[in-house]
Image (cartoon, grey):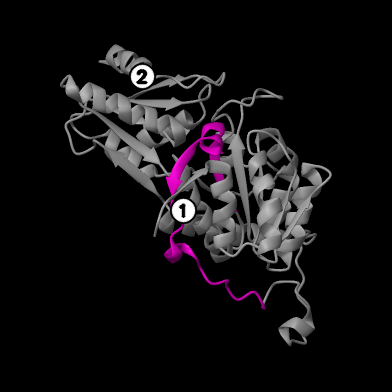
Amino acid sequence: MAKVLMKGNEAIGEAAIRAGCKNYFAYPITPQSEVAEYLAKRMPEVDGVFLQGESEVAVGYMIFGASACGERVMTTSSSPGVSLMGEAISYISAAQCPAVFVNIMRGGPGLGGILPSQGDYFQATKGGGHGDYHLLVLAPDGVQEAVEMTMKAFGLAEKYRGPVMILGDGLIGQMMEPVEFPDDLMTEPSNKDDWATSGMDTRKSDKRNLVRSLFLDPKELNDNNLALKAKYEQMKKEEVLYEGYNTDTDYKVLIVSYGTMSRVCKTSIDMMKQDGIEVGLLRPKSLFPFPEDAVFKASTKESCQSVISIEMSMGQMVEDVERCVKGQRKVDFYGECGGDIPTPEKIIEIIKGLL
C-alpha cells in the first residue's frame, strides 16, 4: 500500500473512517481542531455524520447516545475539553458502551498552552471522571502509530464494551509524516443485538434493551462494578503493549518514556551508544493496562543500576514506574511541561549525571 504524507490530526480522522466510524461529534479546541475540519468534509463523502456540539459537555452525551445504539462513534478533543467530557465518559463506562476518545494533549493545568505536553496521564489512566472505572489507553509515538491505534481502538471498544482513549500530544497532532492505512486493522462490528438500544424492529426482536448506569439496588451496583473489574483484569492479560529499545545490551540505565518524548530518548540512546554508553528504553504503548511485568523485568536486569522516567510533565507516569520497580532499583524522574520538548543533548546530560 502506498504511503501518503499527512498531518497527524487529519490522519487520525481518516483512520477512523477506514475503521468504519460514521459518527463524529466534537467541539473545536487546539491543538486538535484539524480533525474536525477534516471530518467535516470527509464524513458526508462516506454517508457519515459530523455534528459540532455547543460544548464538550454536550459532545460527551452525543457520544453516549450513539454508542448506546451500538454505532461506531468517536470524538477528539484536548485536555480541558476532555475534562468537560469526564462525567459522560464515566456514564459510558458504567453503561458498558463502546466509544473512542482521542486526546491530543496541551499544557496545563488550567487553560495552559497549546504546545505539546503529557500532563493528562493521570486523567487518562486514573479515571478523569467519577467512580470505579478505567479506560483502555493507547499512546502512539508518531503519526503512523496514531493511525494504527485509532483503527484498532474501535474493535477494542466493542470487544470490551467500553471507552478506549488514544492519548497523543500536540506534536503528534500537528506534525506531518508518511502514513499508510492497513486493511488488516479493520474489524467487523460485533453483534450488538443483545444490548444496544437500536430498536426492536431493527433487531427483529420482542426484547427491549435498556442501557443504564443507575443501579439503586446495592447488589446490582456491586455486580456491575465487578463486571467492569473483570474486563479490566482481562485487558491486563490480553492488551498490554510496549516496545523495548536497546534492551538486548548490558545497559546501566533504563529509561521509561512514552509518546513523542520516547522518540527523543531513542536519539539520545543512539548518540550515547557511539560513545560506548549503553542505555535501554522501555516504551509503554498501552498506558492502561500498564506493562507492569515488562518494566519490572527490564529494571531488574543484572547490569541495570537505575531507572528514570522521562516525561513532558511534572511527574505522573513515574508513579506507575516506581510501583512496578517495587524498590529493586532507584527510580529518578526528569520532565519539562511548558511546551518545550527536551533535546537529546539535555537527556544525555541527565543520564550522564545518573552514571
**Residue 4, placed above or below residue 70:** above
Inspect the image, locate mark 2, and give the three-letter code of the amino acid beneath it: Ile
Residue 183 lies in magenta, yes or no?
yes
Per the rendered image, the range of residues in magenta is 164-193
Label 1 SS: helix
Residue 309 or residue 345, whichever sits in front: 345
Residue 19 in the image, given as x and y percentages of width and height: 55, 62
Residue 25 in the image, given as x and y percentages of width and height: 73, 52
Q: Residue at x 46, y 53 (%)?
A: 148
Inspect the image, locate mark 1, and give the three-letter code of the amino acid beneath it: Glu
Q: Residue at x 17, y 34 (%)?
A: 249
Label 2 SS: helix
Q: Is residue 1 visible?
A: yes
Residue 187 or residue 203, whichever sits in front: 187
Name the residue that disc number 2 marks: 347
Name the residue that disc number 1 marks: 148
Q: Quadrant of residue 202?
A: bottom right
Q: Residue at x 45, y 41 (%)?
A: 177
**Residue 28, placed above or below residue 196:** above
Residue 200 in the image, given as x and y percentages of width and height: 78, 82
* Nearest to N terminus: mark 1 or mark 2: 1
**In the rendered view of the protein, which quadrant contains the N terminus?**
bottom left
Residue 57 or residue 97, whichever sits in front: 57
Q: Nearer the viewer, mark 1 or mark 2?
A: 1
